[in-house]
Image (cartoon, rainbow, N blue to C red):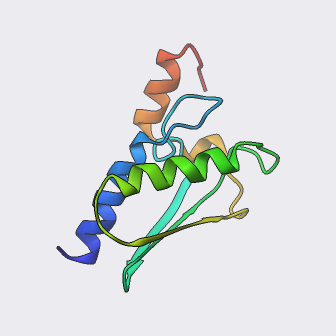
Amino acid sequence: MGESAIADQITEALRDVLEPEIGVNVVDLGLLYGVRTDDGEIAVTMTQTSPWCPDADLLRAQVHQALDGLGLNHTISVTWARKPVWGPERITPDGLDQLRALGLNL
């Protein structure tokens, strides 16, 4: 399986990681900034809805759990990006639909 296919598989698995306070996955919320794979390592770069969010450890644990389930036998690292700053413009159309289903309109 090529690196691009693995990155796609990883991104899809990260849809199981929910932002704890909002309840929408990190991919559709636009919190995932990038996935890199090489030499047996998966490097996930993401952000949070706020730099003061207390859930960094919980999100990191959810990322590890989601990716461990793929059975890729890679080392996993999560890096928190502070720029660009997250904003609602990063939410995907699917994410907007999920938010509307929760009663939130942006």
For the question of whether residue 31 can be seen, the reply is no
Picture mark count: 0
In which quadrant is the N terminus drawn? bottom left
Q: Where is 99 relative to 79, above or below?
A: above
Left or right: residue 23 compared with residue 55: left
Q: Position of residue 61 (x, y in %)?
A: 56, 50
Q: Where is 41 relative to 67, above or below?
A: below
Q: Position of residue 16 (x, y in %)?
A: 41, 40
Identify the residue at image location x=76%, y=43%.
53
In which quadrant is the C terminus drawn? top right
Identify the residue at image location x=53%, y=41%.
29
Q: Where is 12 relative to 78, above or below?
A: above
Looking at the image, which is closer to me, 74 or 81?
Answer: 74
For the question of whether residue 40 can be seen, the reply is yes
Quadrant of res 50 = top right
Residue furthest to the right: 52
Q: Position of residue 60 (x, y in %)?
A: 59, 53
Looking at the image, which is closer to me, 42 or 69?
Answer: 69
Q: Position of residue 87 (x, y in %)?
A: 67, 46
Left or right: residue 78 compared with residue 84: left
Identify the residue at image location x=55%, y=28%.
23
Residue furthest to the top: 103
